[in-house]
Image (cartoon, helix red, strand yellow):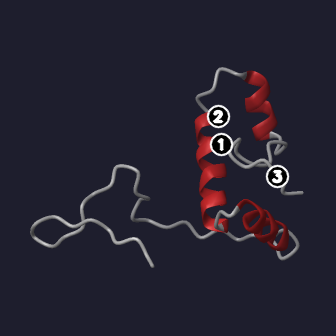
Amino acid sequence: MKKRRPRNSDGTFKEDPEALTKKSIGLRISKKKMPKLEKVAKQSGISTTEICRMIIEEWLDSLESKDEQKRSMIFEGKLLAPSEIMCPIR
């Protein structure tokens, strides 16, 4: 059963501070990479959308990071997944 979103007394949805933004981002992932992403999602029990969101959020957080090694790894495309995901995408 789907989890129901909480509503205010007037029937509108309550605002969740962790909610995703109203704007969506369409990602184009190559046909060769998509099966790998789906495999990781299945192994970890997380949706492909959630994995992409975590990767993007970690990348954005890394922009503020003082760890130069981590920043360079991310900019070179060597950081494959957020730390919550323990299986490689490649």
Q: Earlier in the sequence, mark 3 or mark 1?
A: 1
Where is residue 20 shown, x and y percent of the image?
44, 59
Distance of mark 1 from mark 2, alpha carbons?
5 Å
Instruction: Please tell me how crowded label 1 is: few (under 14), some (14-19), or many (20+) other residues with Cα within 10 Å.
Output: some
Dot 1 amino acid type = Trp
Residue that carries the numbered disc 2 in the rendered image: 62
Where is residue 54 shown, x and y percent of the image?
62, 51
**Image: 42 above or below 16:** below
Dot 3 amino acid type = Cys
Q: Secondary structure at mark 1?
A: helix
Residue that carries the numbered disc 1 in the rendered image: 59
Q: Secondary structure at mark 3?
A: loop
Are circles 1 and 2 on residues that touch, CB within 8 Å? Answer: yes
Distance of mark 3 from mark 1, alpha carbons?
18 Å
- Left or right, 2 with reference to 81: left
Distance of mark 3 from mark 2, alpha carbons?
20 Å
Q: Nearer the viewer, residue 63 or 7?
A: 7
At x 59% / y 36%, what residue is drawn? 61
Dot 2 amino acid type = Ser
Residue that carries the numbered disc 3 in the rendered image: 87
Q: Secondary structure at mark 2?
A: helix
Q: Nearer the viewer, mark 3 or mark 2?
A: 3
Picture quarter with the C terminus: bottom right
Instruction: Please tell me how crowded label 2 is: few (under 14), some (14-19), or many (20+) other residues with Cα within 10 Å.
Output: some
Q: Pick out the residue farthest to the left.
A: 10
- Left or right, 27 with reference to 30: left
